[in-house]
Image (cartoon, rainbow, N blue to C red):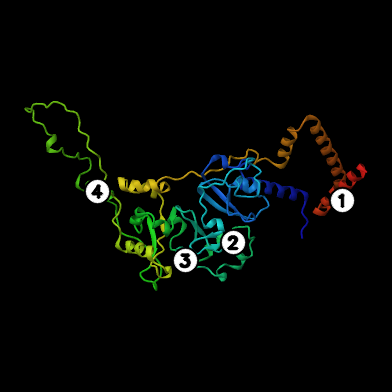
Amino acid sequence: SNPETLADYVASQDVLVKEAAEALPHQFSQCTYPLGHIRQAVYLCLTCPEARGICSACSIACHTDHEQIELFPKRNFRCDCPTESIAHACSLHATLERSNESNEYGQNFQALFCRCKRPYDAASEKETMIQCLACEDWFHESCCNLRERPNSESVPPENQDQDPNGDAASDASNELPPALIGPGDYDAFVCGNCVLQMPLLQKYAGTRGCLIVTRDKPSCPWKVFQDLYVDLIELQEVSESSTRAVGQKRALSPTAIVSDNTVKRPRLSPVLTPYTVECSAPTSNSTIQKIFVDLASMTDPSFALSTGDTFLSEGFRERWCQCPSCLLELEAHPYLSKEEETYEPPEDPDSALSLEELGMRALSRLPRERAIDGIQAFNAMRDHLVQYLRPFAQEGKVVNEADVRNFFDRLSEEKRASRE
């Protein structure tokens, strides 16, 4: 192998420090348990026997050397690390808390995902997975009938040989034929089981901006179903603009025309009438309606004409009907009408500092006597290092890893000998 110069080594360390700062820009010194039930990134510790969830801070500070799976954001979740549900002690929250009874633990907490209930393995997974907006489970594109399930030969050898901790698994879908609905075609995804619990979403399924994949019969290929529905509000606007010339004022109603000879009527208190909003949700398409009726009672999903999965395009939160009936359902599922806030740990002000800057900051916080001892020890090591490297500079030799290790081994031996 080519020898690495000292300058190359220092440069590579700087790159590693910058990458670490970009990957972990936050502070991980506080457990989120005191914040209560919030939407936050949740991790499943596979080393601990309990099927419970921990926050991002505890995943780094308390379960550092444990095997974990990132479950990504879960709403209304409270960290289980400092509770009696997990035997492994929390190092960030000293008080042992009671179990979180209101946390929900779906199949993800058994390391199972999608309707196929397959375990997730980043090293072998070949498909992109999509998170449901409602239940927050993860689904394979093939299980949503967006593409065929890839086999072991679907991924090029160069991707199979990549680092299992890298992005080979998530990038593998890029090597497959295009999906029926690509990532750029939708902003959110709701799985079929969740759509079955939402009559409003069933009305919109198959309309513009609310895509659904169907087939005519079990032997036919999958396709994107789209209805030609145009909502009532848009129809009214088109109708008004076509019947009235540009700049023309709308005629007054006959009751608003008052003759000069008419005696003015005394002003009366206004009579308040309830303001009603007509429902502008689309009428359920008969084909889509039958699909959801069949899904609710079907025992063999292989004969289904759709999974019921719905893909919502950008701006879907502004397109819902606002009548009282539809608003009542939107209130029951607030994430349909309002984007949720996801907790992120506070930023770490030290994340962008170099190792030297971090060392100097730590040194400045030491008591004066210990700081002086530290500086003297550093200067002594620096002098020894200069003496050790001088022959290399004079002879033009490259300092490699073995030379650096040899220097520190000799330094350790001298320190051990001085103590004896």
Q: Residue 299: x, y in percent?
A: 41, 68
Q: Which residue is mark 1?
A: 395
**Which image quadrant: the N terminus?**
bottom right
Q: Quadrant of residue 373?
A: top right
Say which label, 3 or 2, has the lower sequence index.
2
| Kind of residue indicated by mark 1 | Glu
Question: Which secondary structure, mark 2?
Answer: loop
Local packing at callout 2 (Cα closer than 10 Å; few below 14, some 14-19, many 20+) is: few
Q: Is residue 374 above or below residue 195?
A: above
Local packing at callout 1 (Cα closer than 10 Å; few below 14, some 14-19, many 20+) is: few
Q: Which residue is mark 2?
A: 121
Nearer to me, 27 or 111: 111
Count of marks overlaid on the render? 4
Mark 4 and mark 2: Cα distance apart in space: 52 Å
| Kind of residue indicated by mark 3 | Arg
Tell me the number on the disc at residue 236: 4
Mark 1 and mark 4: Cα distance apart in space: 88 Å
Q: Is residue 327 above or below residue 121?
A: above
Q: Residue 186: x, y in percent?
A: 43, 55
Numbered disc in front, either 1 or 3 = 3
| Kind of residue indicated by mark 4 | Gln
Mark 2 and mark 1: Cα distance apart in space: 52 Å
Q: Quadrant of residue 350?
A: top right
- Are circles 4 and 2 on residues that touch, CB within 8 Å? no
